Image (tube, rainbow, N blue to C red):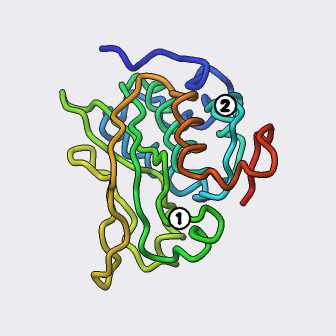
Amino acid sequence: MTHLEPTYYFDFENKSVQDLISEFKTDTLSDKEKAIGIYTKVRDHWKYDPYSISLSKDKYKSSHIAQKQSGNCVEKSILLIACLRALGIPARLHLGKVKNHIAVERLTEKFGSNELTPHGMVNVYLDAKWLKMSPAFNKSLCKKLNVEPLEFDGENHSFLQQYDSKGTRFMEYLDDYGYFDDVPFDFMVENIKKHYPDIFDTNEKITEFKL
């Protein structure tokens, strides 16, 4: 089984990632238990921040993300994949486009749209099947938005919060770009520039955005 190797982006041999998974490096836990544990840790210990965008390759390395306190959906997915691979659990990146329907005023103001792309999630291989999961929205943010946090049980997909607790539409998937063995940096940059052209109006050489 592939999807276990370290890469430039999934550099899980780095100390920052090894420290992160240290509590799960034990034979007393099954792969399912390890996957659930590290998913929950990445989901909640890194606050979701969709407003920071980088066009620098080094900012998408798991070792860099591990040292931050927040991250967007792609960054948190990269970090989770690196952790899973470091624990001997196959994992890969899955990208798509989503539309948010709750608390979108700032999104629309900054991006000119309530669509987020590329949206990152994780495919993990457990018990001979690939499962989708998304560590993007931390528990405290979900509580603020009145949305149930995505829980992963190691047996079922857990990647879409369609409605909030009152039944109001929260999120929908608009497009699926498929899965990738490694981070498709060039594809992501092209995708960002295509969907958010106004960000680049002032200076094409800008590589970091805090919107």
- Compared across the picture, whether 69 is left or right of 161 comes to right
Q: Nearer the viewer, residue 5 or 187?
A: 187
Question: Disc 2 marks which amino acid?
Answer: Ser
The percent coordinates of residue 10 (x first, y second) are 55, 25
Residue located 72% across and 33% down the image: 56
Image mark for residue 113: 1
Front residue of 104/78: it is 104
Label 2, residues with CA under 10 Å away: few <14, some 14-19, many ≥20: many
Q: Secondary structure at mark 1?
A: loop
Quarter of the image where the N terminus is located:
top left
Residue furthest to the front in view is 201
Q: Tell me the quarter of the image containing the C terminus.
A: bottom right
Residue at mark 2? 63
Image spot of residue 46 (x, y percent): 60, 53
Q: Residues within 10 Å of mark 1 (few under 14, many from 20)?
A: some
Disc on the earlier residue, 1 or 2: 2
Report the mark closest to the observer, 1 or 2.
1
- Give the SS element for disc 2: helix
Q: Is residue 205 above or below residue 116?
A: above
- In the rendered structure, which amino acid carries the disc numbered 1? Ser
> In this rendering, is residue 180 above or below 68?
above
